Amino acid sequence: MALLDVTDLKVHFHTRNGVVPAVDGISFQVEAGKTLAIIGESGSGKSVACYSLVGLIPKPPGRIEDGRALFEGQDLLTLSEAQLRKVRGKGISIIFQDPMTSLNPYMTIGEQLIEPLQLHFSMSRRDAWQKGIKTLEEVGIQNAERRMHAYPFEFSGGMRQRVVIAMALVAEPQLIIADEPTTALDVTVQAQILKLLRDLQQRRNIGVIFISHDLSVVADIADDICVMQHGRFVEQGERMAIFQTPQHEYTRKLLAAVPAAAKRPASYTPEPLITITDLYTQFCGNRGGPAVKALDGISLQINRHEILGLVGESGSGKSTLGRSILRLLQPCSGSIRFDGRELVHLSAAELKPLRRRMQMIFQDPYSSLNPRMTVYDTLAEPLLLHGVVDRKGLDTAVFELMDAVGLARANVLRYPHEFSGGQRQRIAIGRAIGTKPEFIVADEPVSALDVTIQAQILDLLLDLVARFNLSMLFISHDLAVVRYLADRIVVMKAGKLVESGTTHDMFTSPQQSYTQALLAAIPGRVLRDLDDSPL
Amino acid sequence: MTTADLQVIPRGVSLWQDAWTRLRKNKLAMAGLVFLLLITLLCLLTPWLVAYGYEQQDLRLGAVPPSADHWLGTDTFGRDQLTRILYGGRMSLAVGFIATAVALLIGVTYGAIAGYAGGRIDNAMMRLVDMLYALPFMIFIILLMVVFGRNLLLLFLAIGAVEWLTMARIVRGQILSLRQQEFVEAAVSLGLGPVAIVWRHLIPNALGPVIVYTTLTIPNVMLLEALLSFLGLGVQAPAASWGLLISSGVETMEEYPWLLIFPGLTLTLSLFALNFLGDGLRDALDPRTAKD
Amino acid sequence: MWRFTVLRVLQAIPVILTVITLTFFLIRAAPGGPFSSEKAVSPQVQAALEARYRLDQPILQQYFSYLADLAHGDLGPTFRYPGRTVDELILDGLPITAELGFYALMIALVLGVTAGVVASLKPNTLQDYVPMGAAMVGICMPSFLLGPLLVLVFGIWLQWLPVSGWGSTPGDKLLPSITLGAMYAGYIARLSRAGMLEVLSQDYLRTARAKGLPEYVVILKHALRGGLLPVVSYLGPAFAYLLSGSFVVETIFQIPGLGRFYIQAAFNRDYTMILGTTVFLATLIVVFNLLSDIAATWLNPRLRYQYKQ
């Protein structure tokens, strides 16, 4: 008998603009000690489905229209709010996505940790505190006794997520809903957290529902997988069956969107476009505090017609390097030569003609476009500024740019907020390639996008690089993405270069232990093994 | 699609239009806007609208309740109250708008400079604002009025000088957060100069909160003027302002309550209208509500 | 954290000094001498008076002697109340104003926080509109209008409560306290609603609910701490406005507090009294700003931690 048995769950949102069927008749079972993964892109209804089981969706506008959810012999959907409260935290607990926001910043970890114990088991404060310490130790937090008195902001992201997991575990639930629990984390931390979850689950024989947008994350840990789109399961079944013989077109699309090994033939002769020597950049500390070294003596070379992948975890200084090359940040010392010209000490006026030749694509398509400018204005601005075309040719030039990045011409007078994330990123790319630059810094250009959109944008970038003979510094935390399109890779850690080499060499024979750890942390080993390409 | 087609392509909905649509749906804010336009118009046109002068006395008549001749009654000197309220409105609204304009001018300039300069300059400029914040300005304004007499120009300047502090903070915060937005970085990397960046990218995006705060400053200023006039430190009779009318209404409220109630109602309704409009504008222009 | 507190106190000193200096020279710059409105007096009397109030000394010397006296807590003699010092008059008025301010602040806090929290729980429903409408009335109805109206209704027409005085007839403290507190109740209601709405949309409240905590615990234990922080920061400035508000209320209800002395001094051109009261009130305001600032920092663990570093 399954731990949780959901049949025909329907959740609708009754908004002013009509009824939205967020969850439209889904059924699934979760067994004790097994992991069920629900995969879907943003807005597919995967979180709503799980939260509605424990009464955590806003009602109104949400309403459970139909269905049954048997858990420990009772139908969760018919329980009153008071009865549901007895299930929440005790029978079923939840691990939320963002550990930065899911802990109360005004309460110590200890206070928050013991709450479920005092509530569900009427434990005394002292006993609960002891149990809290034990649980913290179990999720791998050092000095647990002392750390109970700490506030959330005193922990790093990964440590916070461990605290959140401890909080979910402390009352010994039978079922855990993990909602994108590693999405906000660095890849090595993600690997640790996934392993921790797996270990705990097996030790305690807990059922897990693992919600994710990323197939590769669940590939190694799920027993069963449900693929969700528009509120329905388009496909569900045993993990390997889904991977090996996907039935539904959407599943195949998702699988195809997992970046494979590079398709790009490395057919260029190394001819340096940018040469960086011993570059230092630092940030002044706040109010006279110590300066933070963001770049600590970087030397590297970017060749013409090359895509150089720059990889590192958050805080490694990879964005700072990209911005320093474009002189969006002022380096302290060192040299940046662009096509033979020293950039570091140029004035704004001297830089201007060079700006035409180097451009940037930013991470967040929501903040990288001026919300008060139409597509036309955004694309026309650099063209006019650098005199690429005159007023007469402007309309044609803007239309051609839109064609190049795959935007419908009819959208030319729309504003950014009227577009989806992927379309916005196309506008931003159009702005960057308008002046026909030779070099582009792309700073995590796809990390804010859904997986299928991500694949489209990556292909667009590859296409543009080939078409316009671009060189590109491609910054990403995602090794799989970098592997897909980079010719060479450099790895950064704490402001220094750790290792560099061709993509093939880096993935087959990494020399440094840090690089090896990064590679080992890439999720989706199962998927790669299915792929024929060698690692 | 060719160049000629650009004319027939539908324009998208700009954030301003979007905000206006949202504001129009807010009944309270629209009522406030209509009321304000109406009362401003009435006050501007007063000399051509009313049958009496604001200091025109009729001592034989004395104070009479509202009637066909005097819609809102007369005061103890037999002066028509409607006339005096409208003339008082000219004064109160003038103080409100002019002092707010002063605050706007100083605050926006100061805040924009601090926010754009950043770093040490910003730090020093904001320390000064912090210090000025700690000064008890209300007491200083009273002091100024006492020391230099009831000078209206001084009153505008003094009130404006108090209110610019918050405006400077808001503008500075806006500019600072906008500067960290990637579209401003993108503009820099395109090679745009500082003037173009401020003009095309910063100002249009910082305007929303400035408009909202301006709308909310006007009632504060009007209240301050009314308070000073009530204490006898602002506008002096026979000139009229709403604060002064209320003040003299209080003296005779037992016998002639209409002399307190009508000016009080006018002031309160105007403040209501401004506050509702300000709230409505905030909801309409707030990017957080704009997303959904 | 102690470093922050000490630093903050040290920062307040130049502010107070600025206030004293500004006030001193402003008053000296006033057109017409302190005795100008008086009937003509003989030159000898004039000289004697000026000597008594140190007006015969050079202005800088006057300033420094004033500072020296201040350091001993001596605000000097008054112009208009012969034989009485400014200190005495302030000490007479202070307890009354303090009591009035205290009641008003309590009314403002209790009504304001309750209304704000209640409204924030069900935004854009009747439960939101009614208290927020009331708050708006409080904000838009200035005390010099609300006070007289309350007197008119409850004092004159209904004859339930006395129309003026302080502590002489039972119930005479009620109307002044309400009049003074109403506007701040309105502001505090709006602040706490906004603060609560901000907190209520945070993910960590979902976490609290996911633990199975009943809604009242979620609100009282998890939401209030963060949601009411803006109110704590507002208390300092509110205190300043409360003091200036007390000028009006004390005038309306004829309460012999500090505010009334101040206004009277202003009209009488009693310069030492104005100077003394301004310095005293300004210092008080600066001190309260300081306290609310420190309190808000202490109550916020993140800030506390930052300053510990």
Image: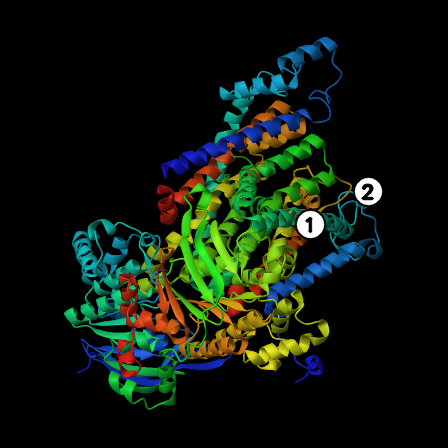
Q: Which chain is indicated by disc 2?
A: B
**Residue toward you, C10 or A92:** C10
Quadrant housing the N terminus of chain C = top left
Cβ atoms at labels 1 and 2 below 8 Å apart:
no
What residue would you read off at disc 2?
B59
Q: Position of residue C150 (x, y in %)?
A: 57, 47
Please tell me the numbered disc located at residue A190.
none
Taking the image as shown, residue C286 lies to the left or right of residue A527, namely: right
Dot 1 falls on a residue whose secondary structure is: helix
Taking the image as shown, residue A420 lies to the left or right of residue A373, namely: left
**Residue toward you, C24 or C238:** C24
Give the amino acid at mark 2. Leu
Dot 2 falls on a residue whose secondary structure is: loop
**Mark 2 Cα-neighbour bin, 10 Å: few <14, some 14–19, many ≥20:** few
**Quarter residue B229 falls in:** top right
Please tell me the numbered disc located at residue B101.
1
**Mark 1 Cα-neighbour bin, 10 Å: few <14, some 14–19, many ≥20:** some
Q: Position of residue B6 (x, y in %)?
A: 68, 80
Q: Residue at x 49, y 66 (%)?
A: A362
Nearest-to-viewer mark from 1 and 2: 1
Would residue B250 be visible to someone looking at this image? no
Q: Position of residue A318 (x, y in %)?
A: 41, 60
Q: Which chain is indicated by disc 1?
A: B
Co-location on one chain, circles 1 and 2: yes
